[in-house]
Image: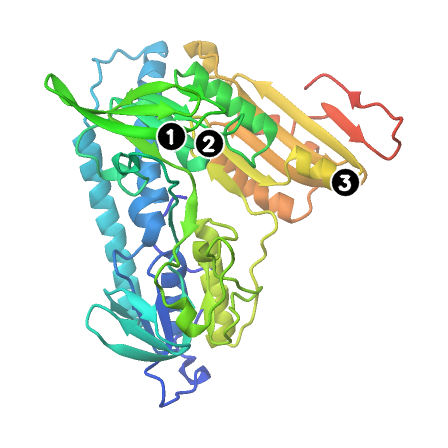
Amino acid sequence: MNLVQPTSTHSTTAAKASVVPREPEFDVDLFVIGGGSGGVRAARVASKHGAKVMLAEEHRLGGTCVIRGCVPKKLFVYAGRFSDKFEDAAAFGWRLSVPRFDWPSLVAAKDREIARLEELYSTGQETAGVEVVRSRAILEDAHTVHLLGDGRRVRARTILIATGARPELPAFEGIEHGITSNEIFDLKTFPRKLVIGGAGYIAMEFAGLFAALGSDVTVVCRGSNVLRGFDEDVRQAVAASYTNRGIKLMLSDSIVRLERKADSDKAARIDVTTEQGGRLEADQVLLAFGRAPNTTALGLECAGVKTGRDGAITVDANSRTNIPNIYAVGDVTNQFNLTPVAIREGHAFADSVFGNNAWQVDYSNIPTAVFSSPEIGTVGLTELEARAQYPVVDVYKVRFRPLMAAVTGDCEASMLKIVVDGESDKILGIHIFAEEASEMIQVLAIAVGSGATMRDFTSAMAVHPTIGEEIVGMLTPTVRYDRREASMPLVTSAAH
């Protein structure tokens, strides 16, 4: 997600102050716990609707995405891509001196941008009339919030919980020697040898960017392949690409022990032992095993708020908990853990509760990007999901080398895949592994959400030469799956 500054996707008007009735038994109309993307959007919109709003954040405004997530990660991804560009430039006739990467300069540049964005968030809340309190806040009952920073107790008519998620860590010996995605952006020295536990999108993004920056990267993954939940062709393409780039994938294995050892001739290293008997040496071990809802010690039990087995707050389609005046949005509900989803949920909540404009978030066809190298862009159903839900499924798939590779000699293959309902011709899902896949999938998600058919795509005029033209140029299905008749064989054809 390229985030420059907080923006609104729905119009709001400060003149609606009369919409929110004042109740003297409450200090504020809305108290927001958590200053991440969802919380700040909800607070700002509610305040513009006339609500008196207070927001508590115990760390920094902006939350995971801005401070220690997608924004700094994308900046690091940009830095890593220069290594390929330097090599490509030589193939196109540029003569460059040997480039040298300086880790402290990248960290400093990242810090400046994060500070700028945090200030924008703070200014946005202040301009909207939201009172921001830098304190941990916990619930004492359904309407009372205790600010631990100064001991105040605030009575709120409505409470919104937007505390996000935190890295989830399993229990094994020496786990304290590892780091999470929270710490990796601020390392004092660059890790020449990096071991990553886990193979989800966070793990794969860091594996790609640190390898591009010059690290020797090893990924230890419990599963038989990376990126569980993504389309199988995408998973295979990423695994093959990363292997070709020198990233070592230890599949069907897991980390069971970390031990830090000091050496008089070099800095302290970490010995990594895996379940299958593997022994690795690393400067840093990144533990990327997923994320858990950040609901610990929030006082949810005091207010009677129900949570699921994973600790996530249970909400309905309007983000309301089992307590009528308490709501929750974003990763703390563990539904769709993406920043744009949290923002949309926060906005829908504020409009519905304070703006006399009730609406719900549509969770169908949410586009997703993985900032690997190349990128992944996906929206809609995977091939396996479609085959389980529809009797006839057509799959259009093409692998190709981008035009630039004709000059650079790069053997990296891009992959485009479209999953289609074979009866209605409606597009069910699109999966891309190519440069700028994130930019393409944002636009393609509009088409999928609007019910576009494969005929709509193939009737569009291509833009040449581009990667995108391959999407509208796939005229014949690569394979058709038809289970209307058990005896009917699969019909396949050569890829376009």
Measure the alpha-carbon separation of dots 1 and 3. Answer: 42 Å
Picture coordinates of residue 254, whole percent (x, y): 43, 28
Residue occupying the point 56% across, 60% down = 361
Measure the alpha-carbon separation of dots 1 and 2. Answer: 37 Å
Disc 3, SS: loop
Q: Which disc is residue 256 wearing?
A: 1
Residue found at the far left of this picture: 264
Picture coordinates of residue 300, whole percent (x, y): 41, 67
Residue 462 showing in the rendered view: no
Picture coordinates of residue 401, whole percent (x, y): 53, 16
| Amino acid type, callout 3 | Tyr
Q: Going by the image, does 43 lie left or right of 397?
A: left
Q: Please determine whether, in this image, residue 138 is positioned above or below residue 216.
A: below
Measure the alpha-carbon separation of dots 2 and 3. Answer: 30 Å
Tell which tag, 1 or 2, sits nearer the viewer: 1
C-beta proximity under 8 Å, tags 1 and 2: no
Picture coordinates of residue 487, whole percent (x, y): 89, 26
Question: Which residue bears the numbered disc 2?
Answer: 436
Tell me if mark 2 has few (under 14), some (14-19) or many (20+) residues whose alpha carbon lies within 10 angstroms of its own. Answer: some
Q: Please determine whether, in this image, residue 268 is positioned above or below residue 348.
A: above
Question: Which residue bears the numbered disc 3?
Answer: 390
Looking at the image, tell me whether mark 2 or mark 3 is earlier in sequence order: 3
Residue occupying the point 33% across, 14% down = 87
Tell which tag, 2 or 3, sits nearer the viewer: 3
